[in-house]
Amino acid sequence: MAGTGFLVMLVIGCANQKAVAAEVIAGVQKDVPFTIIVPSYFPSDVRIVPSGIGGPTTDEVTHSVNLGITYYGSNSEKFIVITEENVNITWVPTHPSITYNINGVEVMSQSVAMGSATKITNGIMYVWNRNGINFEVDVYGYDQTEGKKIVESMIK
């Protein structure tokens, strides 16, 4: 069976990616005063090992801790940025377009865009507060169905 070796390597590669991703998050977790919530669902082309971690940083005024984690998909226009912060103020999108109730948690979303003068990438921002933690999940290059699946996997 010539294909069996490839399948075994693929399975081992996926298992190693999960282990590396878990190790990266565990390394950051020790510096954060709240439990980091990582999606259990990602679109199939997303690399589950974080591509970038911003923070944790502490706000000098509110003393809240902010952490941002970025995951990339198959190209530079497909990425997910997850921000978590333990602050007493609930974030609200400027122009929420849709509100979901996911397992008793109100999630607001709105369209967002980022880029430069020559290139704009459109996305969807999802915002909610749960147990005193504000979450913002910005999903670029994926449709609303995929974004909602990511958010649902974080709210169990």
Image (cartoon, rainbow, N blue to C red):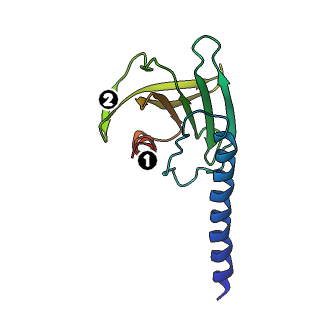
Residue 17: numbered disc: none
Q: In this view, which residue lies farthest toward the bottom?
A: 1
131 in relation to 49, above or below: above
Which of 9/111 is in front? 9
For label 2, the residue is: 99
- Name the foreground residue: 49 vs 27: 27
SS at mark 2 in the image: strand
Q: Establish if 59 lies above or below 84.
A: above
Q: Quadrant of residue 148?
A: top left
What's under tag 1, amino acid-wise? Ser
Amino acid identity at mark 2: Thr
Could you tell me which residue is drawn at 51 percent across and 50 percent down?
43
In this rendering, would 40 be left or right of 14?
left
Which residue: 62% across, 49% down?
Answer: 74
Q: Nearer the viewer, residue 133 or 111?
A: 133
Image-based side of 155 in relation to 118, left or right: left
Which residue in the protein does label 1 denote? 153
Residue 89: percent from left, percent from top: 45, 17
Q: In the structure shown, which secondary structural element does the residue marked by tag 1 occupy?
A: helix
